[in-house]
Image (tube, helix red, strand yellow):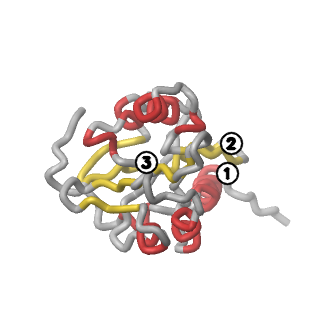
Amino acid sequence: MCFSMKSPMQIYVDHNLPGCSGCRICEKMCALNHEKKYNPAYSRIKVFQFYPGPIDVPIVCQYCEDRPCVAACPTGALIYDTNNFQMKVDENNCTGCRACNQACTNSGRGGCITFNPSSGMAQICDLCGGNPKCAKYCPSDTLHFLAMSRFSKRLAKPAKLIASRIADQFYPVKKEID
């Protein structure tokens, strides 16, 4: 489903079980769309696996309103395009310093910025111009593309924290009975 980019949009990740199956089709389709490579190392979305479970957690940019990643970029290479409501990387200015991803992580977010394994430059979800392949091809219907939530910063959590919450819900610690 293709949406108009006339308003801010985001990829919403449904972190309820049953959820992500860990198939990593989202990673492969993202890499294929952006880099013409069927290699998840080139993806702008990452799936992390935790135990007990396994619990698979996809992490992708949630387009936080305060954008700590943009503010942290020392060269101005990371840009939020207010006309198209998309994050972009100016490849002429990106040094691959990783300050953007560190700022995302230090702000308690998911650390969703990836780095191209060939060039070392930052990669961030650009919503595929309004037709994100990760959401389109997600067989478990875990990824959705919809209007920007006012809770985007709350949704942008580290994969380990999300997995821990899921584990607590579905694998509770049993209390011993005397």
In this view of the protein, which residue sits in the foreground, 21 or 71? Answer: 71
Is label 1 in contact with label 2 (beta carbons under 8 Å)?
A: yes
**Marks 2 and 3, Cα distance to the nearest angstrom?**
17 Å
Q: Which residue is mark 2?
A: 53
Q: Examine the rendered structure and indicate whether residue 119 appears above or below residue 98.
A: above
> In x, y percent, where is residue 32?
46, 28
Looking at the picture, which amino acid does disc 2 mark?
Gly
Q: Quadrant of residue 143?
A: top left
Q: Earlier in the sequence, mark 1 or mark 2?
A: 2
Q: Earlier in the sequence, mark 1 or mark 3?
A: 3
Say which residue appears at 52% left-offset and 46% top-offset. 58
Q: Which residue is mark 1?
A: 171
Looking at the picture, which amino acid does disc 3 mark?
Asp
Q: Which residue is mark 3?
A: 14
Q: Earlier in the sequence, mark 2 or mark 3?
A: 3
Is label 2 in contact with label 3 (beta carbons under 8 Å)?
A: no
User: Mark 2 Cα within 10 Å, few/some/many (few <14, many 20+)?
Assistant: few
In this view of the protein, which residue sits in the foreground, 3 or 142? Answer: 3
